[in-house]
Image (cartoon, helix red, strand yellow):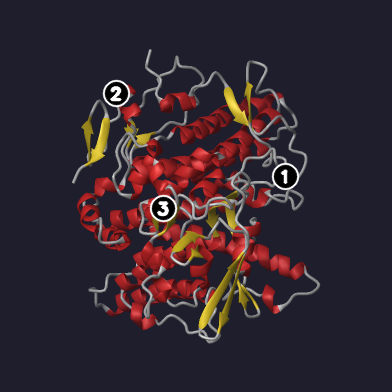
Amino acid sequence: MTPINSFNRAIVRPLIFMLTGLMLLSSCSDFLDVEPSDIIIGRKYWKEKSDVDNVVAGCYSGLQKQECIERMMIWGEFRSENIMAGTNAADNASLSNILKENINSSNAYTTWNSFYKVINDCNMVVEKAPDVAKLDPSFSQSEMKATIAEVSAIRDLCYFYLIRSFRDVPYTTTAFESDDQQLALPATPFNQVLDSLIDDLESVQNNAVITYPKSKLYYQVGRVTQNAIHAMLCEMYLWKGDYAASVRYADLVIDAMTRAYQEELNSKTYSSSDDEMIDGYPLIRNNMGNTYGVAYEDIFGMGNSRESIFELIYMESESALHNTAVSTFYGNSTTYPGLVQPSTFLSGDITLDKPKVFLSKYDARYYESIEKSSSNSYGIAKYATNSISIQPVGTNVEASYGSHYSSSFCTANWILYRLTDVMLMKAEALVCMAPDDENDATANKHLRDSLLRAAYSIVNTINRRSDCNTIHTDIDYTTYASKTQMLNLVYDERERELMFEGKRWYDLVRRSLRDGNTKYLISKVTQKGSDNASVLQSKLAKMDALFWPYNKEELKVNPYLKQNPAYNDLDNGSSTLTK
């Protein structure tokens, strides 16, 4: 019998699922606010709609678990220029080595079983739901198809995290119920998995729920909707290099959210200027008079905002899961800063005459992302605090922060997709569609300028929303009039807007794959400092090194897995990055 590795342990459990409890989902929040419990599912299971609902709830709780959120944070952000070691980081050897770019296959954060567990639960629902619909008359065909669309999207999201992190990964849509099945699987190439994910989402998108009833307060962004699937397709097509398709799906999301907000405005008996859209986008205004941070509080403090597309919701209930990953890494009321903190060059950016990351000291997102915790220490504010008040005072900007979450009760939702993320993905796709600068044909010049101006307009709108200067100045288009310069502007704006949200490293990897080299990535990551700049340049020169090594335990038990060639196999399966 094939030895059981962590991939196998994650997907083979004699029908044991982590569920959010045996409930009938009757209230607006019970789907999301119950601590998971183990139950044994035997032959009497998969008879009723509630059985399916319980397993679907378990898929969400699996994503909410600390192991998953930690990896979303680490895989998507911590190797970027944004992050450096924080309080007691040295006590966590695996984390400390990642921050030093000293990654090997023994690193604890190279394990992926938490994602494969969710994948297998989703596969189980896809296989079992049609049979349940035949047995339970209350489980209609449309509900069954919507459920399959929902779990297919969750499964595809998990695989999307895996391929962006490891490149080639074992891929299956078959549910594993016993170890009699063939468990050891070879890695499927990145592009093949990506195409499969796109095909899957394309096939189920029309079956997905468009909007949940208003009585289901947290469902609209706490569960997968058609908007969430379209946002995923927008990003997947961006990675694939099909920029027209990426723009098409971005527009579907933007248009749907704009219509929804316009309908909300039309239903109001009274509205004020604070309700108005910004340049036609349903963005939340970030200021109330001279005080900024309003959008931050809605999006990251309260959560479930109108700008959100899909987020993992943590309820304020003792019985619910809490976001211990954010509490640990970004800090809490007991330990702040957390295990990580903003890189030194970021923290001091607005003290420069010409900031390198933020366009000026009046960008509210600096203060919404970075908190000065002492005279010489900075922490990550985003997610770690629920409210921020920012005010321009003379030629200075002053910020005050709400309380940090307690160490054991962090209810910060983790946002997977929100409106400005999709807007900026559209901007990136528009720039990539533009003809190259060296093509001087008049028609191409016109097309290039049109596309670059459209991308610029998106960036300028998002940037202006966060400008707390009493006299606003638009970004100077002429400074970014070439294709490369505009692409750099879009990437810089994504860094400013999405800082510490688990996006930055993936952005840099996507850029490297498009460029065919790692020069841009290295130029950004080496901003962390000169101490390890030469080491980083040497290690990250190889494209393979942008991805993670397979964990040594996987290599021991899965004969089909071949280690990432950027890593040397040493000591019975352990690996270290080669220079």
Percent x, y of residue 525: 31, 59
Distance, label 2 to label 3, CA atoms, is: 31 Å
Q: Is mark 2 in CB contact (under 8 Å) with mark 1?
A: no
* Secondary structure category for the residue under label 3: helix
Mark-to-mark CA distance, 2 and 1 = 45 Å
How many C-alpha atoms fall within 10 Å of the one at disc 2: few (<14), some, or many (≥20)?
few
Disc 1 versus disc 3: nearer the observer: 3
Task: Give the residue displayed 40% in from the left and 70% down from the top.
Answer: 348
Res. 2 image quadrant: top left
Query: What mark, if any, has residue 44 been given in the picture?
Result: none
**Location of residue 319 in the rendering, given as x and y in whole percent from the top left corner:** 69, 37
Task: Say which label, 2 or 3, has the lower sequence index.
Answer: 3
> In the rendered structure, which amino acid carries the disc numbered 3?
Glu
- In this rendering, the answer to whether 65 lies above or below 456 is above
Label 1 vs 3, first from the N-terminus: 1
Residue 185, position as x, y percentages in the image: 36, 26
The local secondary structure at tag 1 comes to loop
Of 10 and 350, the residue lying toward us: 350
Residue carrying label 2? 559
The total of numbered circles placed on residues is: 3
Which residue extends farthest right? 269
Which residue is label 1 attached to? 29
